[in-house]
Each structure stands twice: as C-alpha cells, then as structure tokens.
Image (cartoon, grey):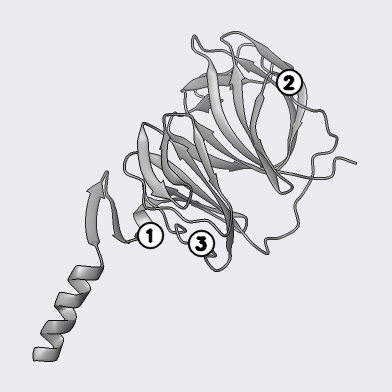
Amino acid sequence: MKNSFLFFILFALTAQISVANSNSISYIYLKNFAIANKDSVALDNAYVKVLRDGAACTLANTPNFGTRIIVALNKIKFKSNRGTIKIKRGEIAVFLENEFYDLPKGSYFEIALKKNHPPLTKPNEWVEPTKNTVIYEDAEFRVFEERLNPGDTRALHSHAQRVVVRLNQVQLTDPRYSPNGKPGTGIQVANTVKFAEPMVHVTKNLSAIPLFNIVIEFKIDPN
C-alpha cells in the first residue's frame, strides 16, 4: 500500500494529466503526448488521419505517421521543439517526422500523413491551377491557400489527391455544366475537412464572400 501511494505521488510530480471537453471532444495529454477520443477524428483513410481540436501524433517518430500539419481555426499557441508556435485562423505549422509539439489549445485541425500508404492516383491531365498561393512545399506534398473572389472563375485546372480544410462558407460551381449552380449543391461548409480525389475542372465562386481553403495536396509526377 505504501509503495502504491509513493508511486502515485511520483507520477503526479512528473506528469501532467488533463481531461478537457469541447464540443463533445475529449482528450488526455501527458507532456508532449496527446490522445484524442474517436469523437475528435474528422477523417481517417489510408492516406491521412485528421483530428479536430485534438491531436494523436504530437510525439516525434510516431509509428506509421510522418509529417503533421496543424491548421488553425482561431488563434492558437503551443510549445514545440522549435519553440512557441503562435498562429491564427488560416495559418499553418508543419512538423516533420522527427519533430514534436504540445497539444495546442484552441480550435484547429491536425492532419497526419500516413506512411506506407497506397500508390497515389492521378488526374487525366495536369493543368496547374492559377490564383492560389503555395505556403509550404517539399518532396511529398504542398500546402496552398485556395482563394477565389466573389463571382470570379478559376480556369480549367487539375488536382491530385488532397485534404481540403474549408474556412469560408461559399457555393461553387463548374460553369461549363451549371453556370448559376443548383440550390444546395457545391456548398463549402466552413470549419470542415474533406479528402478529395484527383480531378480536372473549372471553378466559379457564386457567393458574396471569397473562397478560402487550406489545401494539403500530395505531389505527383504530372507526366
């Protein structure tokens, strides 16, 4: 009994355990390691795992995972091996496989790229998109701000497999097939995430506010 009590005191002095609930999301964090329950998993497939307001890959060299990208939905601040990170809505922090960070406080997505994923697929042709801004790029993927002003059109362009974090709620259409859109279609719901397959299309923003997405797109050989 005495040994058990001493062990508990030692554990309390050397570790921090916190339980938080936010929008039905619960998680426990222990120093640099975070465990999020299933309710915080926004997307999970063979290529990526995405958590909302939680993190499962904060440690360096997490088995089966490589680079992780934090996309802020509001102002967040957290510590990492690179020091304190401060980012606001629409900004990102990229952590390579050998880097670590504490569980951020606030609203965000953690996108963790899986290792040994299936081969990437390609669109039928490759036409580089215009009007986007690349904010991070390496040999595996790139991250870009996908923006389009109200009423504006992005000419024919291609996409590889990608994660799309939607920040503004807008309606989009491919004007080749539906110039004015159709009620309830093409809606980009703010603060949501999706995994999109390769495609070639034209995009028009039908809304009164700009399109603003953060896109994490796998790199492919366009030839």
Residue 163: percent from left, percent from top = 59, 42
* Residue closest to the far left: 2
Q: Which residue is mark 2?
A: 130
> Which element carries disc 2, helix, strand or loop?
loop
Return the disc, 2 or 1, that comes first in the chain's sequence.
1
Disc number lying in front (2 or 3): 3
Q: Position of 152 compared to 49: left or right? A: right
Tell how many labels.
3
Is residue 1 shown to the viewer in this render?
A: no
For image coordinates 57% across by 18% down, the residue present is 182
Mark 2, residues whose alpha carbon is within 10 Å: few (<14), some, or many (≥20)?
Answer: few
Q: Which residue is mark 3?
A: 60
Residue 46: percent from left, percent from top = 61, 59
> Dots 2 and 1: beta carbons under 8 Å?
no
For image coordinates 50% across by 20% down, the residue present is 170
Residue 222: percent from left, percent from top = 85, 40
Residue 162 marker: none
> Is residue 211 depicted above or below 143 in this figure?
above
Q: Which residue is mark 1?
A: 32
Mark 1, residues whose alpha carbon is within 10 Å: few (<14), some, or many (≥20)?
Answer: some
Quarter that holds the C terminus:
top right
Cα distance between the residues tagged 3 and 1: 9 Å
Cα distance between the residues tagged 2 and 3: 35 Å
> Which element carries disc 1, helix, strand or loop?
loop
Return the disc, 3 or 1, that comes first in the chain's sequence.
1
